[in-house]
Image (tube, rainbow, N blue to C red):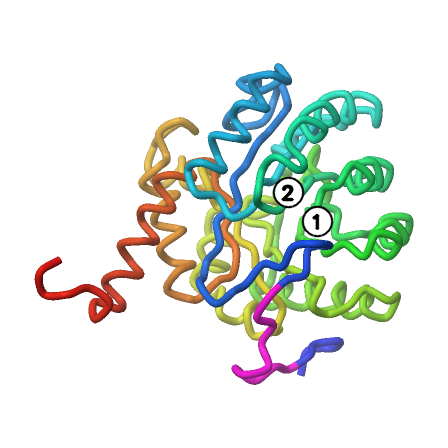
Amino acid sequence: MIPGMKQFSNHERIRSLRCRDVSLSFVRTPLVMGILNVTPDSFSDGGRYIDSERAIERAFELAEDGADILDIGGESTRPGSDPVSEETELDRIGPVLEAIIGKIQIPISVDTQKPFIAEEALRLGCHMINAVCACRDPRMVEVLLRYKAPVVIMHMKGDPKTMQDDPTYSNVVREVTDFLSERAHQLRGKGIAGDSIVVDPGIGFGKRLCDNLALLDNIGKIRSLGYPVLVGGSRKSFLGKLLDADADHRLSGSLAVAARCWSESVEIIRVHDVKETVELLKVLDAMADGSAYSIDS
C-alpha cells in the first residue's frame, strides 16, 4: 500500500463533493469544469477576458454551455510565467466573483496559489479552491478549515517559472500517485475531510510529452486512491506537439483526453471548450446506454 493511501472499494468511493452550500454528485462522470482565465498571459485564452465585463459575460456563457463547475483564475501558471501580487490577482477576479456569485447556479472554484486570495474568494461566496500549489502553505489549510471548503490538490514539479526546465522521473505514474496520496494524507491529518479533497495529476505541469501520455494511460491508478480525480488536459502543449497545432487548434486532442477520462470514470475534467465537451460526453453516454432511447427515437 502506498504510504498514506486510503483503499476504497467501489461501493466506498466518494459519490459527491460537498461545496459549502452545494453538493456535486458523481453519479454522472465526468463533470465538466469550465475555465475562465482573467489574465493577460494564460497560454490559451490570455487577454481575452482580462476586461471584467467580458469575463462576466464569459462566465454566463460557460454556464449556459453546460458547465457543471466554473473555475476562475487571476494568475497564469503556464510554463515560464511570473507570479503576480495579491492585489493584482484580487483586482482581476474580485469584480467577476461579485457579479456572478448568487446569479450562476453552479459551483464556482477559484484557481489560486495564495491563501489571501483563497480567503477573499471564499468570503465572497465561492465554493471551492483549486490549489495548484497542493496547499504547501499551511495558511491555505487554515483558510480551508475556516470556511469548510473543498480543495483540489495538484502535482507540479517545481514552480510555473521553472517546471518545464528538463523535468525527469524514474516512474512518473508512481511518483505522481505517491505525491497525491501523501499530500491528501497530510491534509486529512490537519483536519481536512477526505470527502473534501480532489486530486489532480497536473497534466502539463513539470511533465514531458511521454509523462503526460503515461499519466493519462494510467489514470485508473490515480483513481485507485479513492479520491475524486480532476484532469486538466485541455489545449495543453503536449497536444500541440502531437497535432502540430497552436493552442486555438487543439480541440480534437482536448476531446480525445475527455473521452479517455470518460472511459475511466474520472470525476472532473477541466476544459476551455465546454459546449463541445458536453456534447461529446452526451453521445458517449448515449452509446453506452442505448436502451434509454426508444426504437422510434
For the residue pair 160 and 231, the one nearer the viewer reads as 231
Q: Secondary structure at mark 2?
A: strand
The quarter in which the C terminus is drawn is bottom left
- Please state the extent of the stretch shown in magenta in the rendering: 7-16
Residue 110 in picture, x, y percent from top left: 69, 40
Residue 210 in picture, x, y percent from top left: 46, 52
Q: Is residue 208 visible?
A: no
Can you identify the residue that label 1 sits on? 128
Q: Is residue 88 visible?
A: yes
Q: Quadrant of residue 288?
A: bottom left
Is 182 a magenta residue?
no
The residue lying at 60 percent from left, 16 percent from top is 53
Above or below: residue 125 compared with residue 43: below
Residue 97 in picture, x, y percent from top left: 69, 31
Whether residue 45 sits left or right of residue 138 in the image: it is left
Q: Amino acid at mark 2?
A: Ile
Residue 246 in picture, x, y percent from top left: 40, 27
